[in-house]
Amino acid sequence: MIIKSCHIAQFGKWKEKDFSFSDALNPYLWENGEGKTTLMHFFHIMFYGLSGERKQDILENERKHFMPFQGGNFGGNIHFQEKGKNYILERSFGLRKAEDSFRLLEEGGKESKDYSENIGEEIFSLDSEAFQKVCMISHEDLSLRFNSSIHAKLGNVSDDREDMQKFQKVQNTLKDAINALSPNRRTGAIFKKKMEEESLSASLYRKKEEEEAVLSLEEEVLSLEEQWKEKTKEEERLEEEVQKGILEKEALGKKVEYQKLQEELEKAHYRYENAKKWYYQNRLESLSEEEQDRLWKEELQELKSKINALKKEAEKPKEEASSGKETEERERRNPLIYILSVTALAFLLLFFFKISGGNLPVPGSLSLLIAILLFAIAFAIYYGERERRNAYLGRRLAEEEKRGKEESLRLSSLEELLSHYHKVEEMLSLEAEEKERQEALSAFLAQGENKKTVENSVADFVSLEEAQSRLERHRKEQELLKDNIREKREEREDRVEILKALSEQERTLQAVREERQAMEERIHILQQTKDYLEKAKDAFASEYRGPILSAFTKYFQELTKTKMQFAITNDLEIEFIEGGMRRSLAYLSEGLQDLCRFAMKLAIFDAMFPDGKAVLFLDDPYSHFDDEKGERGLALLDGLSEKRQILYFTCSASRMP
Amino acid sequence: MVRLIHTADLHLDTTFSSRFSKEEAEERRQGLLLAWNKLLDFGAEKRVQAVLIAGDLFDSPVVSRSTMDIFLSSIRKNPEISFFYLRGNHDTKNTFLFQEHLPKNLFLFSHEGKKYRLNEKLVLAGQEFYGRGEQEEENYFFDSEEEEEQALEEGMNCFPEKEEPAQGIWNFKEEDCNLLMLHGMLRESSVSKETSEEKASSERTPEAVQTEDGISLRALSKYPIHYLALGHIHKREEGRFGALRYLYPGCLQGRGFDEEGEKGFYYLEINEQNKEIRTEFVPLKDGEFRIIEVLLSEEDGSLEALEKITERIREENAGEKDSLRIILKGEKSPEGERNLRYLEKQLSENHAYVEIKEECRLKLHKEDFMHEKSLKGEFLRMVSDSESLSEEEKEKIILLGIGLLQGEEL
């Protein structure tokens, strides 16, 4: 590929600038800052477009970097020849990608479809970065100050600007990522996930057990509830037994009561019968039951009448005695005595009145005399009556004595009768008592089931106390059973909660498992990527190792006029051989190292373009060379330009070919 | 005319996948209960007489008390509806046995089978194949016949009128309209799909209705069954095997992207006189799992992808409560990787859950790098020519390698 000419409409400091180029060496002596690098970039972006669109850094974002300060589009055109055909490449770049334009024309101006917008890759078979690294050699690429090593690592086929070779960096990145995920290292994420998974799995064994435990508990509860049903039936039976016991106890009580009533009735009957026996004596056997009950009552009435009669008789003297007493009481009360006494008293009072100075028509002595007289008369009357009374009393006493004797005779027979009467009268109460007892017994039998109760005999005797005791024990067992059921149900719920937590753990386990699987997939891809990158590197290196070594040796010798033996590693690292030992180029002097880098760059270019069909851009590559080597370098340029087009830039006349 | 609801596979108390956080998973569990409530609201509105639940009501044999309480309370709150539950493979014998005071309007089945006469012409039978446990109870919830009769008198169970004798549920009467509930896979889904071998094999030997291999429609077709109410398959499906009509209602609500799409239950109107059964699918719209494919081109970056995805979501009418899996199809460039995390975050603002899967093929023009004299060219050639790597692996390795060589961070 030969660049014939170019027109820069606007690019960096260049504006409406034209350049023409020869097919061989095109040297340019430009001051620093005159635009050497800018021109090289122009060619780069014309063939490859702008890069770093997503980057914000102006150094990385080429659009921002090369946009004119005043704004507007930038670009231009390149006239070039490829495979014997002339083309015009026109490109313009705006503020954003949508404003960019690309046109490829044939020499006559006709639109060409021979290449697309990826024209750089299509012509040079290198991507943008590789093109820069291979086809554009700058003095900065060669200086030790900017490069840590003289490698020609592939990803970096010519990139020494980074501190680390990019390919190695990529491999290290992959290696670190693989290690970080490692299933074998304790610090590896997959290892940790596996541990986590194992731990969760282990605890989830419990889940099955818990589930079984819950189901087992349910079975247990159901079994206990069956027992409960049985126990309830048993309780009913025991309650019936207790009830039976109570009834029997009541029955027993009733029987006792009946017996008691019966006994009392018998006693009352016995007493009454005895009374009748006493009463009737020998007559009893000849009398019927009815007569036995009737006759004595009749006779009792008769007896009563007799007694009453006797009583009446006995009461008469008492009346007379009482009337005599009344007469006596009347005699005792003769008022003459009192009248005379009072009159006498009055006259006595008159006397006293007179003697005390009172004025009376009668003399006091007369009053006194009358008073004494009256008192004497009253006394005489009183004495006479007292004598009379004593005589009367004497007569009466005798009469009463006589009467008393008669009455005591009367009273002793009355007593007898009364006594007999009372005894017979007692029979009334005995009969009444018997009747009462009979009624009580009948009333008892008539009450409820008493008759039946007393008539029934006790078949199976149930001890109430025993039955109650059994019932109480049974109820305690039921309570315990109920508590047990409740506890089991609660335990079941507790285990269900545990199961819920375990289910959540199971979900966590599933998530952990999925993460682990994703990581394993990821590590597999990382490993495969690393392996394929390594294989690609080896394949690429093996293809270019020989040509690169050969070209490097040639260029080294041309530049140094020194024959040295070199070797190249699998990583395309050049080593020199001294004393049969391979040594790194780092052992060489700084100047020689710069030279080696240049030789390497040229060697890589030759390896990439064995037919030389590419443009080589050299930006003052000999600036660090000493004079001697600088001259050799310039001589080399002539040789290089025989087969390839070279654009050579320098800021020093001494380094102009 | 009898109105019923047929549903199955509610899987209440599901644990949910680890893609959801603990809180999200809990919310989704409540969502399942809410879906059940919506079914009941519909049933109350339509005045259905019964709800048939053909298995897997719960997700695990151990059910939390709170979920069980809510479920049983919801049944008690609808005393005019009878609920018939047939155990599925996720149930055990204790699923309801363990509960105290089961509602009177909840009716269960057994391994031996049970039949309920819903009215003088309509019979519902069911036989359980699953449900661990050796012993079966005739009555799960009535302690005595007297109690059962009393419940009937009280009108709690207007439906069914009585329970038929348990000895053999297969003595169906021709004059009845017979419904059968089963839970399991079908051995053959229709006459047309049944292979000739299957047909010949079944004709040679008498078949059991349900075995480990599944439910035999051929065996069932011998009985005068007019509707087979099934459960077990989470995707709704209906069909016929001769005169036998079967239906899977699908799960009531999806629980993951393997259960994506419209979910709901079936509403049935049965004319038991002429044995006509009209079915209507009732979708439950909230909280569906949707998978949406979006076609992208190589030039589409993250923002362009977001626009296209949003447009597709609008076209698919996905709701706010829906969970979305967006699958990116089409092409992508090695240089421009889309920021999927950013896209998920943006879309999650309008939907309950969003995940994005990249299935775009890497657009590699081999001719571009075939002759490239660089490590990158060599790397691309080696990877793309590799026979030991899958296409997916090649894409990932190339994207990673090229990105790293271009200076991108890992």
Image (cartoon, grey):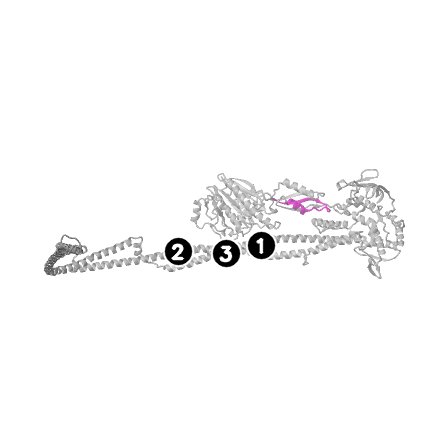
Q: Residues within 10 Å of mark 2 (few under 14, many from 20)?
A: some
Residue A415 x/y as whole percent: 16, 60
Element assignment for label 1: helix
Image quarter of the N terminus of chain A:
top right
Structural distance between the alpha carbons of marks 2 and 3: 28 Å
| Residues at discs 1 and 2 in contact (Cβ within 8 Å) | no
Between A283 and A334, which is closer to the camera in this rendering? A334
Q: Mark 2 sits on what residue?
A: A239
* Same-chain status of marks 3 and 1: yes
Q: What's the magenta region?
A: B322-348
Q: Residues within 10 Å of mark 1 (few under 14, many from 20)?
A: many
Q: Amino acid at mark 3?
A: Lys
Residue A523 appears in the rendering: yes
Residue A568's x, y, as percent? 81, 56
Marked residue nearer the N-terminal end (1 or 2): 2
Looking at the rendered structure, the kind of residue marked 2 is Glu
Is residue A320 at all visible to an observer of this figure? no
Tag 3, which secondary structure?
A: helix
Residue furthest bottom in the image: A579
Provide residue A315's location: percent of width, then percent of height. Answer: 14, 56
Q: Chain of mark 2?
A: A
Name the residue beneath numbered marker 1: A502
Tell me if residue B340 is in the magenta stretch.
yes
Amino acid tagged 1 = Leu
Is residue B11 in the magenta section?
A: no
Residue labelled with disc 3: A488
Secondary structure under tag 2 reads: helix
